């Protein structure tokens, strides 16, 4: 089930840009958007955009493929558990005036395509919940360039670890997450009505399970049990992600084919892939669909990394019935024209402009009835559980619990 892709026009966008309450880039010149717990550690930059009340700040960074800087501004919007706008006003959830100038920027250094790299440290909020960060040009809220989700949790409910809970397998192709919550530290009068749980896999919103209600509530012990006996809230297990390493252009890494340097930006051909549906499961460690920006050849990857035209190739004796997309965290798991594959002469191809680094990716058909990668219950996946309670005051959904689980950890 999808988190509802809400389109809101309360800003009255004369520019034709409509605010969507999801991770979205509104202009083609904006690339490599990441939001993560503030750190310069590449591994930390792959973590979910989640923090706790009073915890670490979150940071957003992105590239603008332009010669010179632009005045960008940021604003924070509070959202309900299903990513619709809440009824709260700015002063309810943020202490400062809710518009921030993004003045931390650096020009790229000796790159084939010039760009300006921006960073913005997101200020702390006063309430837990879902938030949407929007970034726009020259203080004009109609001239959107980025919207990005992040979450802040109060962590007042606890996950009870029991041997008979965790991941269960109802089908060889699916994974099911079962859990128990202890809500002794928070006053919830009617949990069946006011509490909603959301589970997502590998930081994806496109296949998140929402509106999850407890299967049993023990009011004397103040516990909520989430145990499922069918596949209604399960996830397709998928496969370990494919990956390609072009952090170095002098010596391209694993799963690269050939690199054409006759024009700039360079063209990198990823090693030809093959469909994996129906094959035996092969275990290896991946990035769970994420990516790392890095330049092994020179300097700091954020400002020295080159953009390349990266060509993906997937042979197929005949076209699939539905469209095929190259997907990963690098494109927010969306299916759009920029990552749609084209079929010709027995193969699918797709050309995507990507910054130097290491990228996980997969091939995903538009229809769930088809599969390129296959689904194997042995696959290692990261799951997150979000627990929301709709309080009377403030009148909004508060994120009261957040948990990070790994299935089949290596």
Image (cartoon, rainbow, N blue to C red):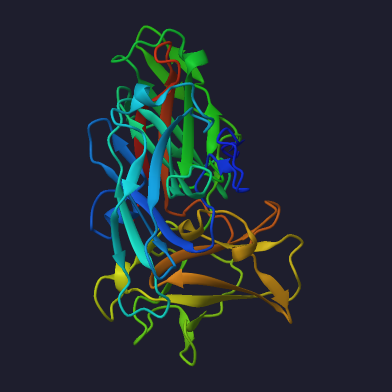
Residue 304's spot in the image, x, y percent?
31, 74
Question: Which of the 4 image quarters holds residue 234?
Answer: top right
Q: Considering the image in quadrants, where does the N terminus appear?
A: top right
Q: Nearer the viewer, residue 185 or 24?
A: 24
Residue 70's spot in the image, x, y percent?
39, 58
Query: Residue at 38% across / 73% down in the picture?
Result: 356
Q: Nearer the viewer, residue 305 or 117?
A: 117
Query: Residue at 49% across / 42% down in the picture?
Result: 141
Left or right placement of residue 45 versus residue 339 in this view: left
Q: Considering the image in quadrants, where does the C terminus appear?
A: bottom left
Q: Is residue 57 above or below residue 295?
A: above
Residue 80's spot in the image, x, y percent?
48, 27
Could one spot residue 165 in this view of the protein? no
Q: Nearer the viewer, residue 374 or 293?
A: 293
Query: Residue at 56% across / 46% down in the picture?
Result: 206
Q: Nearer the viewer, residue 251 or 370?
A: 251
Residue 198's spot in the image, x, y percent?
48, 33
């Amino acid at each position: 089930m999808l988190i509802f892709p809400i389109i809101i026009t309360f800003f009255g966008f004369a520019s034709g840009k409509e605010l969507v309450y999801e991770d979205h880039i509104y202009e083609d010149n904006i690339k490599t958007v990441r939001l993560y717990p503030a750190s310069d550690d590449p591994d930390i930059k792959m973590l979910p955009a989640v923090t706790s009340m009073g915890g670490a700040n979150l940071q957003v960074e992105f590239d603008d493929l332009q010669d010179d800087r632009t005045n960008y501004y940021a604003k924070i919007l509070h959202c309900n558990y299903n990513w619709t706008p809440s009824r709260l006003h700015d002063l309810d959830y943020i202490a400062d005036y809710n518009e921030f100038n993004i003045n931390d920027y650096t020009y790229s250094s000796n790159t084939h395509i010039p760009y300006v790299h921006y960073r913005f440290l997101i200020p702390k909020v006063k309430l837990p919940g879902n938030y949407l960060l929007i970034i726009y040009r020259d203080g004009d809220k109609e001239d959107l360039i980025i919207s990005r989700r992040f979450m802040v949790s109060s962590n007042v409910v606890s996950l009870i670890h029991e041997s008979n809970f965790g991941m269960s397998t109802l089908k060889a192709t699916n994974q099911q997450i079962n859990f128990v919550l202890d809500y002794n530290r928070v006053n919830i009068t009617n949990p069946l009505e006011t509490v909603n749980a959301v589970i997502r896999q590998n930081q994806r919103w496109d296949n998140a399970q929402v509106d999850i209600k407890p299967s049993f509530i023990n009011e004397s012990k103040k516990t909520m049990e989430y145990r499922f006996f069918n596949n209604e809230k399960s996830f397709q297990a998928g496969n370990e992600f494919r990956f390609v390493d072009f952090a170095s252009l002098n010596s391209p890494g694993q799963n690269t084919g050939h690199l054409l340097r006759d024009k700039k930006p360079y063209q990198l051909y990823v090693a030809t892939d093959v469909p994996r549906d129906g094959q035996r499961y092969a275990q290896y460690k991946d990035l769970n669909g994420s990516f790392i920006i890095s330049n092994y050849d020179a300097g700091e990857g954020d400002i020295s990394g080159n953009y390349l035209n990266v060509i993906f190739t997937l042979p197929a004796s005949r076209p699939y019935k539905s469209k095929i997309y190259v997907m990963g965290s690098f494109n927010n798991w969306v299916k759009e024209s920029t990552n749609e594959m084209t079929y010709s002469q027995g193969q699918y191809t797709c050309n995507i402009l990507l910054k130097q680094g290491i990228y996980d990716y997969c091939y995903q058909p538009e229809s769930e009835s088809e599969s390129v990668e296959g689904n194997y219950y042995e696959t290692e996946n990261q799951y997150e559980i979000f627990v929301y309670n709709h309080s009377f005051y403030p009148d909004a959904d508060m994120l009261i619990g957040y948990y990070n689980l790994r299935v089949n950890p290596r």
